[in-house]
Image (cartoon, rainbow, N blue to C red):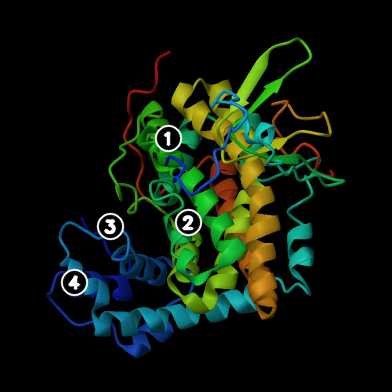
Amino acid sequence: MPNSPSEPARHPSGAPSGAPEAASGEARRVVVRRKGPMLVEGPVEVELEDGSVVSSDRFQVALCTCRRSRRYPWCDTSHRDRA
Amino acid sequence: MLPAPRGPLSRAVTTYLRGAGPLPSEAEVAAAPVYGEDLQLALYLCYELHYRGFADVAPALEWDPDLLRTRAAMERRFLAALREDAPRHDSVDGALAGILVEPVDGTGVSHFLRDKGELWQLREYAALRSLYHLKEADPHAWVLPRLRGRAKAAMAAVEFDEYGGGRADRVHARLWADLMTDLGLDTTYGRYVDAACAELLVTVNLMSLFGLHRTLRGALVGHFATVEITSSPGSRRLAEAMRRTGAGPAAEHFYDEHVEADAVHEQVVRKDVIGGLLEDEPELAPDVAFGVAATVFTEDRLGDRLLADWGGGRSALRAPLSQAATHVS
């Protein structure tokens, strides 16, 4: 839905309309926990070490922080304790 | 079409649904084994009227007072048995602790199928699970009007993802139908009810019971959390089983998608659905814990049944599957 006229323009500086919201001054909150993935509101693009980019358009994305995921950079619950 | 009856209760209910006879008596309801084939099928028939119904049943019977009274009598027995049999936990965290740990040497159905499942066993598994997956996420949608604020927003977001994020070709029930096609199964809704054992009917009746009663909204949330928490690692094992047996690309994709989706859903459900619900209504904590425990209890019963049958070289279905052309890659 387009912004209504009463709302301030999203990108007053003339940033490209596809720029992430954070660039317009609205900080995106990322949820971190000592144990478990980092939660980021989607859609998300992730640039990996080799320069390749993967993307997810899920409403919320769980990024692996334990580095054990077999679907890295996405969480696959490999951080869980094993017993 | 209505499935075949399995005893006096389900016979009376199917006859009543056709408009051809009386409902079972209270004494008949009281006499039937609570987790047995007959009572569980009769309850399943009552619940199905709230989903998609049956071609040969008048849709208005969904709200027939006499049928609802019979359903309530079966539900009272089912719920009492579950409260008796599901392990008790002091807290929601205590109930979840057991499923947040991955066993090193797991012995469940997904471990069995990953390590030595044969194609015929995967087909039987899919035929059984189709009773839920062809209406995946539907029982949980009933809880939405009973939540508010943070819990409602988070629950709706996860359900939106289950329903394909607005894209019909990504609805999880659709992905499931594609998996069934890969396995040479019939994707017609309700096709395998006759083949499903009582242990499977119990797992689906549990969600319908929790979903249809506002008083059980805490238990429904506990059920949903359990599904989402256990799904990701289980789906990885089932994806491996599908790959190893050459089941087909859609069969692999269904479980691959659930590895990633449910790792996210788990976090959202724990943090915002359970967290939000208990912030609003902390007195529901024991119900959430009960929902978790009842889900684990009924899934374990199903797993034991399947492994006993397959371990003994037997079919786990009440009616054998027809030999169907399997996927050719």
Q: Are marks 4 and 3 on the same chain?
A: yes
The subunit letter for the residue under badge 4 reads: B
Of badges 1 and 4, the one in the foreground is 1
Name the residue: 34% across, 53% down. Answer: B193
Q: Badge 4 is on which residue?
A: B60
- Packing grade of label 3 (10 A; few <14, some 14-19, many >=20) is few
In percent of width and height, residue B324 lies at 32, 28
Q: Would you say B157 lies left or right of A34 here?
A: left
Of the residues shown, which amino acid type is indicated by label 2? Leu
Q: Is residue B183 above or below residue B59?
A: above
Q: Residue furthest top?
A: A50
How many C-alpha atoms fall within 10 Å of the one at disc 4: few (<14), some, or many (≥20)? Answer: few
Residue B248 visible from this viewpoint: no
Of all chains, the one bearing label 3 is B
Q: CA distance from mark 1 to mark 4?
A: 31 Å
Choose the circle earlier in sequence order: 1 or 4: 4
In the rendered structure, the answer to whether residue B58 lies left or right of residue B292 reads: left
Q: Which mark is residue B170?
A: 1
- Judge depth for marks 2 and 1 and give the one in front: 1
Secondary structure at badge 4 equals helix
Whether residue B115 is situated above or below residue B6 in the rendered picture: above
- Above-or-below relation of A13 to B78: above
Chain ID for label 2?
A: B
**How far separated are the C-alphas under marks 2 and 3?**
19 Å
Give the Cα distance between marks 2 and 4.
27 Å
Q: Name which residue lies at 46% across and 42% down.
A: A3
Q: For residue B289, what is the image quadrant? A: bottom right
The circle on residue B200 is: 2
- Reading the image, the residue beneath label 3 is B52
